[in-house]
């Protein structure tokens, strides 16, 4: 990754911060993007070789400015990690349009906007895009009308990006994490849900931020040079096992 410039959105904490740290270990320069200015400054102050930029990825003008600042400061973009995301779980009938729009604005519009704005620079570097979806985009589940649909759309958008951008040498892939104990997940996972995940997942535990970051950094690296249009589930076996009946296991 040395000499490479990576933009990571949602970098102030959680999976985005772990990916920032791993990218830095690999020698990249990291542009840390987040709309939580306080958390962003706190995280960036502990790191070297980073450029923190406050930006709401759902706002087209802010995204354009973020890309322009990156190019002014570093002159190139090699990797774009679209990681910023929000979760809001609820039943279909009581999912308000405001909630639907809030989830789509960050999780889907943000991926579209950041990618589109970065494409001219990615063409020059023959760079790559890694979008962060979720296991919730690979299979439907209760309460995830907005969140799950946004993440399924991200998986398809990744394939669109791979189809159109491959001829420019740009790869686009997706990571679909299973449960990780971040602020986002802990806001929607009760203790009963945590226990049930531990029981049902083949690896019997949550993943760590670093385990998701390792999948992301792999897809950004030259080791993945012939991989594009794929979704890598980093999920402790969640997706492969489908419906797991507790009665069959006990
Ligand atoms: N934690 C999990 O269990 C889990 C599982 C599957 C997928 N994911 C996905 O991983 C990604 C990272 O989530 P996390 O668990 O690290 O969450 P997190 O809440 O710890 O971090 C998300 C970061 O994104 C930032 N952010 C949110 N909306 C933004 C916006 N519009 N513009 C700029 N920044 C914004 C937040 O301020 C925060 O710093 C998300 O896309 C999430 O959907 C997480």
Image (cartoon, grey):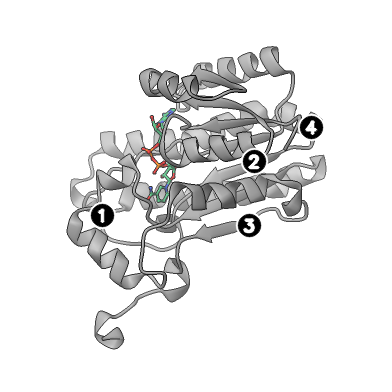
Can you tell which quarter of the image residue 196 is in?
Answer: bottom left
Q: Are marks 1 and 2 in contact (CB under 8 Å)?
A: no
- For marks 1 and 3, the one nearer the N-term is 1
Mark 3, ligand 1, within 8 Å: the answer is no
Task: Measure the C-alpha gap from mark 3 to mark 4.
Answer: 21 Å
Q: Is residue 15 above or below residue 12?
A: below
- For marks 4 and 1, the one nearer the N-term is 4
- For marks 3 and 2, the one nearer the N-term is 2
Residue at image position (69%, 31%) is 119
Mark seen at residue 209: none
Residue at image position (43%, 52%) is 208
Helix, strand, or loop for circle 2?
strand
Q: Is residue 55 above or below residue 114?
A: above
Mark 4, ligand 1, within 8 Å: the answer is no
Mark seen at residue 125: 4
Number of marks: 4
Residue at image position (34%, 49%) is 181
Task: Measure the C-alpha gap from mark 1 to mark 2.
Answer: 29 Å
Q: Are marks 3 and 4 in contact (CB under 8 Å)?
A: no
- Which residue is the site of mark 3? 230
From the viewer's perspective, is 91 left or right of 150? left
- For marks 1 and 2, the one nearer the N-term is 2
- Which residue is the site of mark 2? 129
Q: Is residue 182 above or below residue 233?
A: above
Helix, strand, or loop for circle 4?
helix
Task: Measure the C-alpha gap from mark 3 to mark 2.
Answer: 11 Å
**Observer-nearest of 148 and 77:** 77
Mark seen at residue 143: 1
Task: Measure the C-alpha gap from mark 1 to mark 3.
Answer: 26 Å
**Observer-nearest of 132 and 100:** 132
């Amino acid at each position: 990754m040395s000499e490479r410039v990576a933009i990571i959105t949602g970098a102030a904490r959680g999976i985005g911060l772990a990916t920032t740290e791993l990218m830095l270990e690999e020698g990249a320069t990291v542009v840390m993007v987040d709309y939580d200015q306080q958390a962003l400054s706190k995280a960036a102050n502990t790191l070297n070789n980073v450029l923190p930029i406050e930006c709401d990825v759902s706002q087209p003008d802010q995204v354009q400015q973020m890309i322009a600042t990156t190019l002014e400061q570093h002159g190139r973009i090699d990797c774009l990690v679209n990681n910023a995301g929000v979760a809001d779980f609820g039943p279909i009938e009581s999912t308000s349009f405001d909630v639907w729009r809030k989830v789509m604005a960050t999780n889907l519009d943000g991926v579209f906007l950041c990618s589109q704005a970065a494409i001219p620079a990615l063409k020059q570097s023959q760079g790559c895009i890694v979008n962060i979806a979720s296991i919730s985009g690979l299979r439907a589940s209760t309460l995830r009308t907005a969140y799950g649909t946004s993440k399924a759309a991200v998986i398809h958008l990744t394939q669109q990006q791979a189809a159109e951008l491959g001829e420019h040498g740009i790869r686009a892939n997706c990571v679909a994490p299973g449960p990780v104990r971040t602020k986002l997940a802990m806001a929607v996972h009760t203790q009963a849900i945590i226990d049930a995940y531990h029981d049902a997942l083949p690896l019997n535990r949550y993943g760590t931020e670093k385990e998701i970051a390792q999948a992301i950094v792999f897809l950004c690296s030259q080791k993945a040079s012939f991989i594009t249009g794929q979704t890598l589930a980093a999920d402790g076996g969640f997706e492969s096992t489908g419906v797991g009946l507790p009665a069959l296991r006990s």
